Image (cartoon, rainbow, N blue to C red):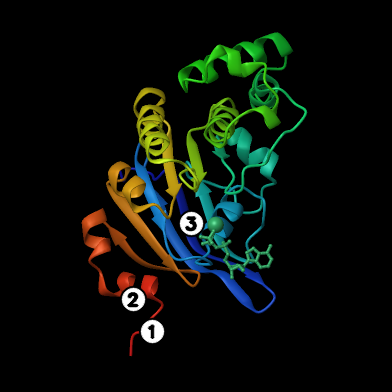
Amino acid sequence: MMVEALLETKDVVKRFGGIRAVDGVSISVERGEIVGLIGPNGAGKTTLFNCITGTYTPEEGHIFFEGKEITKLPSNKIIRLGIARTWQVVRPFKKMSVIDAITTGALLRHGKIDEAREKAREVAQFLGLPEEILKKRGDEITLMQHKLVDLARALATEPKLLLIDEVGAGLRPAELNMMIETLHKINKERGTTLVVVEHIMRLVMSISKRVIVMHEGKVIAQGKPEEVSNNPQVIQAYLGIKPV
Ligand SMILES: Nc1ncnc2c1ncn2[C@@H]1O[C@H](COP(=O)(O)OP(=O)(O)OP(=O)(O)O)[C@@H](O)[C@H]1O
Ligand SMILES: [Mg+2]
């Protein structure tokens, strides 16, 4: 029997007017791996995440999670099945406290507020968010802390698959190192499968054994980090030169 992929997309298409933002994407993600998803600006990475999480419904193609078709499911059903995501643009929660923001994620699987808060605390501690941060409001914390809170909110939903969209952007070198360790820790200690969209090559290359490259809505390469970074098509896509 073949081992079933955790996530599989088949010929997924998502258009915006005349643009095919995602143009026939077929990828597969195995249970337990960390996959890097890279590509120049506008390649369709975030749109693919939006299709997988039910933020958008693709016009064509199919998406399977644990062998079950999820293509047309609403986002609340998809998150319940075990797919969570973080956001490319940090969504500041100005008035809410950190612990409450994380608790909103935990409420997915814990109906009682005390249990949800307990879960939120456990995840915050796991990610190394100090106790004194938990009471702070969104407008009192740093970008790094915001990113950890966003990760914590997603992890509090107890995902099997976590889609991470540019978690490295804007971080200082030391913070970036901490983030790399944090992503490894999530994968190793919680067993969460990760798909990591990232422009910072140091982050991608140090966490993923396998990298998928998108360009103009299509997958143009995939393989080991050193293979894809030497692939002429990938280099051309990044330099903005069309092959003749
Ligand atoms: N809601 C939308 N309405 C119209 N066009 C959109 C929308 N979202 C994305 N697009 C377009 O779809 C294409 C893919 O965008 P997408 O945001 O998925 O790229 P990306 O690979 O995530 O890029 P980046 O690295 O800059 O975040 C782009 O041409 C973008 O302008
Ligand atoms: Mg994006």
**Residue name at image x 67 percent, y 51 percent:** 55
The three-letter code of the residue at mark 2 reads Gln
Say above or below: 140 vs 60.
above
Q: Secondary structure at mark 2?
A: helix
Say which of 181 and 84 sits in front.
181
Q: Which residue is mark 3?
A: 9
Foreground mark, 3 or 1, reads 1
Real-space CA distance between mark 2 and mark 3, rounded to the nearest whole angstrom: 26 Å
Real-space CA distance between mark 3 and mark 1, rounded to the nearest whole angstrom: 27 Å
Looking at marks 2 and 3 on the same chain, the residue that comes earlier in the sequence is marked by 3
Quadrant of the picture in which ligand 1 is shown = bottom right
Query: How many numbered markers are drawn?
Result: 3
Foreground mark, 2 or 3, reads 2
Q: Secondary structure at mark 3?
A: strand
Q: Which residue is mark 2?
A: 236
Asked whether residue 89 is in view, the answer is yes
Q: Quadrant of residue 46?
A: bottom right
Q: Position of residue 235 (x, y in %)?
A: 31, 71
Q: Which residue is mark 1?
A: 242
